[in-house]
Image: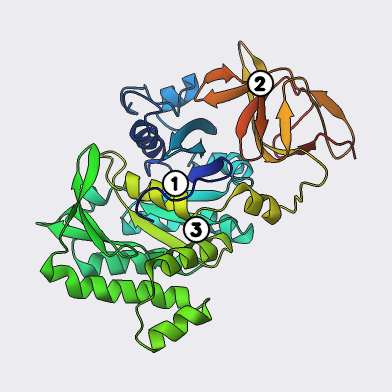
Amino acid sequence: MEDGGPRADTARCIAIAGPYGSGKTTLLEGILSHTGAINRKGTIEAGNTVGDASVEARAHSMSVEVNSANCSYLGDQYFFVDCPGSVEFFEETRNALQAADAVIVVAEPAPDKISALQPLLKTLVDENIPHFIFVNKIDKSDGMSGTGHIQGLLQQLQEVSAKPLVLRQIPIWENGIATGFVDLALERAFVYREHAISEVIKLPADLAEREESARYTMLETLSDYDDHLMEELLEDIEPPADEVFETLKRELAEGLVTPVLLGSALKDNGIRRLLKALRHESPTIAQTAERLGINGAGGAVVNVLKTYHTPHSGKLSLVRVLSGKIKDGDTLFTKDGNGERIAGLFDLVGTTTKKRDGAQAGDTVALGRLEDVQTGQMLSLKRG
C-alpha cells in the first residue's frame, strides 16, 4: 500500500469542503502542483490560484462558488471540486457533495474553529457521504505541541462528528513546531520537507510508546465494526498491513468511520499522504452510484453539481457521470422526460475549458447549453 498498487477502474471525484479560511483553495493548489497539473503553485494573496478564479472571488479573497480541476496521480484520474466555505453559500456546497466519491473536510487546529464544522459534518453523515478530515495548518498550532494537544483536538472534533474518528497520524514535535509525523497504518515516521516529498526516518525512540498507544486506539476503533480484527486484538495478534488498509477502506466506504490526517497545505506538508489515502481508500464510482441508487441498467446517468453562466461559452453545467458514457451531441432527459442536447463537452479547470469528445462513468465534466437543466438534477440518456 506504500506506492503502486492496482489502478482504479475509473476516475474519482473528490470534494474539498470546510469553513471559510480553513485553506481549501490552498490545498487544491498544492494537490495540483504536487501532481504536475500546474507548473507553479499560486496563492490567494497573488490572485493566481486555479480555484477562486472568478472576478467576485478575487475581489473578496474567498470562494463564492464551486471550482473544479482535474489531475492524475500514479496513473489514476482525479477530479477535485473545491466548495465555498462561507455559510451563505452552504447550499452551493451541499449540491456539489452528493455525487462525490469522498469529501476532504479541511479543519484548522484551533478550538474556536471546530464548532464551524458541525453543519458540514452533519450533512455528510445524514447523506452517508464518505469523508476524511484533513487538519490543516498543523505548522501554526501556536506551539501547543505534544500528546495532550492532539488528543484534545481529536476530542473536540469528535464532539461535532456523529461518526467515530480514526486518527491516522501523530505529529513529531520539535520546540513546539510540527516537523513530521508517524503514519499509524504504515508504522513509519516521516520528516517534512517544505514544498518537497516527506522523508522516511527511523521512528524516534521517545515516540515509540505514543505511537504504539495511538495505533492500538486506531485499531480498536476499527475493530468495533470488524469481528476478525477484534479477535486479533483480543489475542494480541498483530494484524497484517493489508488487512488494516482493507478495513479502513471498507469502513470509510460504508460510512462507519472518519479518518483524520494532518498537514500544511501552504507548505505542501502531508499532501502526498492524503493523496495516498484517497488512492487506496476512497470509494469507486460503482460504490458511489450504488449509494445514490443508480444501477446503470438504464444507460448513462449524470448528476448536475453546479451551473455556470459564462460570458463566452454561455451556460455550462458541471456534471458527474454516474454510469455509462456520454458524448457531445447526445440528448439527456430529466425525470419529467424533457430532453436537452449537449452542445459542447469540456474539462473545466478553474475558469478554463478544454474540449473533449466524450466522458464515461467516474468523469466530472462541463456540458454546454443545457438551458432548462438545474443544479441538483439527475439526467439520463434514456427517457423516463
Q: Answer yes or no: do the residues labelled 3 and 2 have beta carbons within 8 Å?
A: no
Up the image or down, 144 lies above or below 320; here it is below
Residue 349: horizontal and vertical position, in percent? 50, 25
Viewed as shown, does residue 375 lie left or right of 168?
right
Viewed as shown, does residue 136 lie left or right of 174?
right
Q: Which residue is mark 3?
A: 118
Give the spatial CA distance, label 1 vs label 3. 10 Å
* Quadrant housing the N terminus: bottom left
Q: Answer yes or no: do the residues labelled 2 and 1 have beta carbons within 8 Å?
A: no
Q: Amino acid at mark 3?
A: Gln
Give the spatial CA distance, label 2 vs label 1. 36 Å
Residue 304: horizontal and vertical position, in percent? 69, 36
Q: Amino acid at mark 1?
A: Pro
Task: State whether residue 95 appears in this view.
Answer: yes
Residue at point 39% right, 83% down?
A: 233
Farthest bottom residue in view: 235
| Mark closest to the chain's N terminus, 2 or 1 | 1
- Looking at the rendered structure, the secondary structure element under dot 3 is helix
Residue 26: horizontal and vertical position, in percent? 36, 36
CA neighbours of label 1 inside 10 A, class few (<14), some (14 to 19), many (20+): many
Give the spatial CA distance, label 3 vs label 2. 41 Å
Numbered mark located on residue 93 in the image: none
